[in-house]
C-alpha cells in the first residue's frame, strides 16, 4: 500500500512540477500526510522583435493571429495606451529624480566649499600665532646666549677642562628644536688630528713584512706550522740519507655505472681492507664482493686521491661523431623554409599556389593535420625546400620542430584577421630558434583586408617590418589570385643569399625526422629532411630508438630516387619500427653498431619511464593514492595515422581537466586499431579514438561483442571537443543557493504538540514550506534547517507572500526569540562544464 493510499496526488496548475509532503492537522490530534506537487507558473516573455512588428502593423492591436485568445481590438488598444502612459510616468519620475540628485550634489558642494574656507582661515590664524611665539623664543635665546658668552669670557681658564669632558648634547629651545652648535673645543680638535694620524700610520706600516706574508699566506690559503715542520723533517731525513716516504701515484680510475668493491680497489691499486674501512667510516657495512653505485665509488676514489673517469653504456654512441667540416668541402645548399601562422590563415593554400598543386583538398576540413615537406623549383631555377606546419593550437610541438630544422620562417598572417594566438606562438618559435623571418600578409584580395593593421599589431611583438623602418621583409600576397607570389620568392632568395647556406654532401648523412607513420603495405615510413651529407639507398642508419637499412627513398612528388642531398625532404622505407617525430637520423658503418645504439636508447627510455612512474617511498605512494581519491579519470586509447598527430592529441588530452576530473591516455600509437587495442580498452572501460585510421575486421567484431566504443575522427577539433564533453559529464553538479525571502520574528508562542512557534512578518520575497531556512540573530547564523510547519491563521499553507503574517516552527530547534530574522532559500543543482 503506497503512502497516498492510491489516491490521486494533489497539485496546483502550472508547469514545472515540484513534489513535497504536507502534514494536515485535524481535531483531536489527528494528522494526515498528503503528497503535494507545487507547479511553477510558466512566464511567457515576448520576443525582442515583437514590439517593433506590432508598431509596423497598420492596426493598433497588431496581428490578430499572434494576439492572446479572447482579446478584442478595443481591449488591445486600451492595453497599449495604458502601457504608453506607464512609460511616460516612468520617464517623468526619472527626470524628477535626476533633478533632485543634481540639486543635492550642488548643495553638498556648497557646504564642502564653506567648510574648507573655514578650515583654511583657522589654519592661517594658528600659523601666525606659532610664528609669533617662535620669534619671541628666538629673541629670548639670543639674549641668554649673549649673557652666557660674557660669563664664559670672565671665567678662569681652569674651568675649560671639565667643560670639555662633559660634552653636553645639543641645546634645544622652547619648541624642542636644536640650537646651532657651538665652535669646536680643543679636545675635539685633538681627537680629529689623532684619527688622521692613525690612517697615515697604517699606510706607512703597509710596506712591512708580516709572518703570514712570509709563509706565503698573503691573500690565499696559509700553510700551518705543522706543515712547515713536516717539510723541514723530510728535508733533514733526506740530507742524512734516511728513508723517504714514496710519493703516492695518482691514477685515472675508469668508473662504470656499477662496480664491485674488490674491482674498485684493484683499479686504484689500493688494499681491499683500506677501501672497506673507508666505506665503514662513511656508514656503509659492505664486503669486498658487494656492488657500489657510481656516486659512492666516486667519493671513495676522491678520498684516496685518484682521478675519476666516468664511463657508461652510452659510450656505444661515440661512433656517431659530429666531424668538423672543412671549408673546401662545403657547397651551397637549398634553403629550408617553414611556413607558419594561425589556423585558416592560408598557409597551405599559399604553398599550393607556389607549387601549383592542391594540398588543401586532401586535408580533412581544409585544416593541415601533418607537417608537409615539399621541394619547389622557381622560374629562375632556384630550388627551395618548404615545410608546411599546422596552425591549430594542438600542434605546438610540430611548429617547434619545424622552427628548429629551418633556415627561414615565412610567417603567414591573414590581412582580414590580423595577429592571432598561433601567430604569436610562431613568432616566439622563430625567435627561440634564432632564424630570420619573412612576413607574408595573405588574403590581400579580400574587401576587409587591412595590411597596415597587421604591420601595426606585429610591432607589439617586436616584429618590425621594412615598411615600418625595420629589418623584417614583408610581402602582400594572395593565394587565390597569385598576387605577390613572385615578390615572396624573390624575398626568400634574397634572404638565403644573405645566409650563405652551405653543407658537405660527401660525408655520412644526418637528418631530422619531420613525420613518421605506419603505412599498410610499406611498413614504418619516416619523412626525413637531410641536413648534412647524402642519404643513399642501402645505407644503414639509426634514428631514435629504431634502426634500419634504406630500402627506398621517395621524394615529395612520389618518385623513387637513389640518393638525397642536403636540404632534400624524402620518405625513408626500411625501418624496424616507427620513430618519434623530431628524432635525429644518423648513418652508421655496420648494422651491429646501429642495433646496439638503438637497443641502448630503448633501454634508457624504458628505465626513465619506469623511474618516473614508480613512487620512491611508501609515503609518496600513500600520498598519491590519497590525492587520487577525489579525482575522476576518463581513460581513452588513441590511434593516429602519423606519429606527430598522435603526439599532438596526447598533449591536447593532458590539458583537459581540473582538480576533480582528468583525461588519462592509456595508450597512444600509430596505425590501424587492432584486436589488442580493443582488449586493453575493454579491461579499462575506455573508448578507442581513431584519428584518420580505421579498425580492422577482427577488431570491429571483437568491439561489437565486448561493447567497446570506437570513434573515428578526421579533424582534431571534433576529437578534443568530444573528449572535453565526456570529461564534463564526470563533474559533480554544483549546488547553488537562491535567496527567496526574509521574515522578522515579532513574537514567540508555545503551542502544545508543536513546541515554540514564531509569529513572523514576511518582509521580503516569499516564505515557502519546502525551502531551507536559516535563523539569524544579530546578523550571525545560529541555525540552519527546515521548517516543521508554516501556517497562515490556522491553516497550513505552502507559501506566504511578502507583507503577510504567518507562523513558523523549526524542525528539531526551539531556541527562537523575538527580533530574530529568518532567511529563506532554495537550493538548485547546476551542471558544470570544463570550459
Image (spheres, rainbow, N blue to C red):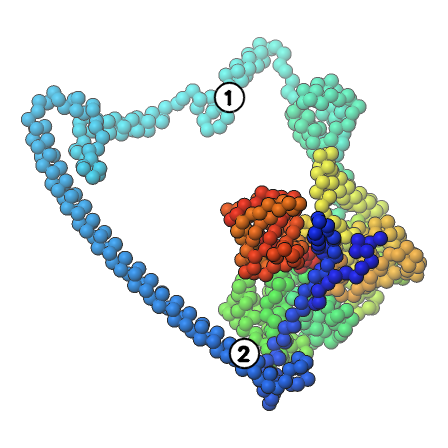
- Residue at horizontal 59%, vertical 76%? 449
Q: Residue at x 54, y 78 (%)?
A: 83
Q: Is residue 352 left or right of residue 688?
A: left
Residue situated in front as seen by the camera: 353 or 701: 701
Q: Is residue 93 above or below residue 608?
A: below
Up/down of 673 relative to 602, above or below: below
Question: Is residue 627 depicted above or below 678 in this figure?
Answer: above
The nearer-to-camera label among 1 and 2 is: 2
Residue sticking out furthest to the bottom: 58
Q: Of residues 331 and 489, which is closer to you in this image?
A: 489
Q: Where's residue 376, x and y in %?
A: 72, 70
Q: Is residue 344 visible?
A: yes
> In x, y percent, where is residue 657?
70, 53
Q: Is residue 574 left or right of residue 607?
A: right
Residue at 33% across / 27% down in the picture?
202
Residue beneath disc 2: 83
Give whichever of 552, 191 is nearer the camera. 191
Residue linked to disc 1: 223
Between the C-alphas of marks 1 and 2, the distance is 105 Å
Q: Which type of secondary structure does the marked residue at label 1 adopt?
A: loop
Q: Residue at x 64, y 20 (%)?
A: 247
Image quadrant where residue 555 sits: bottom right
Amino acid at each position: 500500500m503506497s503512502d497516498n493510499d492510491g489516491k490521486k496526488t494533489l497539485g496546483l496548475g502550472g508547469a514545472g512540477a515540484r513534489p513535497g509532503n504536507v502534514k494536515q492537522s485535524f481535531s483531536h490530534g489527528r494528522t494526515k500526510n498528503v503528497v503535494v506537487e507545487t507547479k511553477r507558473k510558466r512566464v511567457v516573455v515576448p520576443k525582442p522583435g515583437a514590439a517593433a512588428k506590432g508598431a509596423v502593423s497598420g492596426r493598433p492591436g497588431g496581428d490578430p493571429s499572434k494576439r492572446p485568445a479572447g482579446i478584442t481590438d478595443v481591449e488591445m488598444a486600451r492595453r497599449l495606451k495604458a502601457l504608453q502612459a506607464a512609460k511616460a510616468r516612468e520617464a517623468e519620475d526619472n527626470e524628477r529624480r535626476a533633478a533632485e540628485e543634481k540639486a543635492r550634489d550642488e548643495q553638498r558642494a556648497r557646504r564642502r566649499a564653506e567648510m574648507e574656507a573655514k578650515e583654511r582661515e583657522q589654519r592661517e590664524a594658528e600659523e601666525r600665532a606659532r610664528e609669533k611665539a617662535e620669534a619671541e623664543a628666538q629673541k629670548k635665546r639670543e639674549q641668554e646666549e649673549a649673557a652666557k658668552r660674557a660669563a664664559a669670557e670672565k671665567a678662569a681658564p681652569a674651568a675649560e677642562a671639565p667643560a670639555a669632558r662633559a660634552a653636553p648634547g645639543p641645546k634645544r629651545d622652547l619648541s624642542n628644536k636644536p640650537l646651532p652648535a657651538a665652535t669646536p673645543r680643543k679636545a675635539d680638535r685633538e681627537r680629529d688630528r689623532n684619527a688622521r694620524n692613525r690612517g697615515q700610520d697604517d699606510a706607512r706600516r703597509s710596506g712591512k713584512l708580516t709572518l703570514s706574508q712570509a709563509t706565503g699566506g698573503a691573500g690565499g690559503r696559509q700553510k700551518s706550522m705543522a706543515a712547515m715542520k713536516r717539510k723541514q723533517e723530510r728535508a733533514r731525513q733526506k740530507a742524512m740519507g734516511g728513508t723517504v716516504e714514496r710519493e703516492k701515484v695518482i691514477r685515472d680510475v675508469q668508473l662504470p655505472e656499477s662496480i664491485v668493491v674488490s674491482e674498485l680497489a684493484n683499479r686504484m691499486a689500493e688494499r681491499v681492507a683500506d677501501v672497506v674501512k673507508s666505506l665503514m667510516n662513511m656508514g656503509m657495512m659492505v664486503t669486498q664482493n658487494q656492488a657500489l653505485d657510481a656516486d659512492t665509488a666516486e667519493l671513495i676514489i676522491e678520498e684516496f686521491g685518484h682521478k675519476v673517469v666516468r664511463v657508461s653504456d652510452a659510450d656505444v654512441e661515440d661512433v656517431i661523431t659530429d666531424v668538423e667540416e672543412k671549408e673546401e668541402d662545403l657547397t651551397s645548399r637549398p634553403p629550408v623554409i617553414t611556413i607558419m601562422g594561425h589556423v585558416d590563415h592560408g598557409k597551405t593554400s599559399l604553398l599550393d599556389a607556389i607549387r601549383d598543386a592542391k594540398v588543401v583538398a586532401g586535408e580533412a576540413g581544409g585544416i593541415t593535420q601533418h607537417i608537409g615537406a615539399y621541394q619547389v623549383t622557381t622560374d629562375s631555377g632556384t630550388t627551395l625546400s618548404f615545410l608546411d606546419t599546422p596552425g591549430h593550437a594542438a600542434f605546438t610541438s610540430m611548429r617547434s620542430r619545424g622552427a628548429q630544422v629551418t633556415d627561414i620562417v615565412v610567417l603567414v598572417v591573414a590581412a582580414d584577421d590580423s595577429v592571432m594566438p598561433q601567430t604569436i606562438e610562431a613568432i616566439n618559435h622563430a625567435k627561440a630558434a634564432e632564424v630570420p623571418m619573412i612576413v607574408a600578409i595573405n588574403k590581400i584580395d579580400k574587401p576587409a583586408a587591412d595590411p597596415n593593421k597587421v604591420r601595426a599589431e606585429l610591432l607589439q611583438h617586436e616584429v618590425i617590418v621594412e615598411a615600418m623602418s625595420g629589418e623584417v621583409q614583408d610581402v602582400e600576397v594572395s593565394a587565390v589570385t597569385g598576387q605577390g607570389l613572385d615578390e615572396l620568392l624573390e624575398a626568400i632568395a634574397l634572404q638565403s643569399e644573405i645566409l650563405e647556406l652551405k653543407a658537405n654532401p660527401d660525408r655520412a648523412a644526418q637528418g631530422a625526422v619531420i613525420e613518421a607513420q605506419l603505412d599498410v603495405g610499406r611498413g614504418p615510413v619516416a619523412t626525413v629532411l637531410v641536413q648534412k651529407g647524402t642519404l643513399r639507398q642501402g645505407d644503414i642508419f639509426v634514428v631514435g630508438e629504431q634502426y634500419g637499412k634504406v630500402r627506398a627513398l621517395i621524394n615529395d612528388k612520389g618518385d623513387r630516387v637513389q640518393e638525397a642531398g642536403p636540404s632534400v625532404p624524402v620518405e625513408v622505407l626500411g625501418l624496424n619500427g616507427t620513430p618519434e617525430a623530431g628524432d635525429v637520423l644518423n648513418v652508421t658503418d655496420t648494422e651491429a653498431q646501429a642495433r646496439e645504439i638503438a637497443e641502448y636508447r630503448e633501454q634508457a627510455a624504458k628505465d626513465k619511464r619506469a623511474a618516473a612512474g614508480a613512487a620512491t617511498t611508501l609515503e609518496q605512494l600513500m600520498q598519491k593514492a590519497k590525492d587520487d581519491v577525489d579525482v575522476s579519470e576518463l581513460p581513452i586509447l588513441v590511434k593516429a595515422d602519423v606519429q606527430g598527430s598522435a603526439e599532438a592529441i596526447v598533449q591536447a588530452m593532458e590539458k583537459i581537466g581540473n582538480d576533480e576530473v582528468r583525461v588519462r591516455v592509456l595508450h597512444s600509437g600509430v596505425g590501424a586499431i587492432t584486436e589488442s587495442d580493443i582488449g586493453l580498452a575493454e579491461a579499462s572501460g575506455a573508448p578507442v579514438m581513431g584519428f584518420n585510421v580505421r579498425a580492422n575486421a577482427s577488431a570491429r567484431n571483437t568491439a561489437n561483442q565486448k561493447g567497446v566504443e570506437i570513434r573515428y575522427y578526421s579533424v582534431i577539433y571534433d576529437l578534443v571537443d568530444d573528449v572535453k564533453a565526456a570529461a564534463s559529464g564526470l563533474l559533480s553538479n554544483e549546488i547553488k543557493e537562491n535567496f527567496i525571502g526574509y521574515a522578522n520574528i515579532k513574537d514567540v508562542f508555545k503551542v502544545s504538540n508543536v513546541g515554540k512557534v514564531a509569529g513572523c512578518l514576511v518582509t521580503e520575497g516569499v516564505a515557502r514550506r519546502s525551502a531551507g531556512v536559516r535563523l539569524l540573530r544579530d546578523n550571525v547564523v545560529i541555525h540552519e534547517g527546515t521548517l516543521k510547519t508554516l501556517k497562515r491563521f490556522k491553516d497550513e499553507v505552502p507559501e506566504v507572500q511578502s507583507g503577510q503574517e504567518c507562523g513558523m516552527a523549526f524542525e528539531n530547534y526551539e531556541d527562537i526569540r523575538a527580533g530574530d530574522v529568518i532567511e529563506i532559500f532554495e537550493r538548485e543543482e547546476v551542471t558544470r562544464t570544463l570550459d
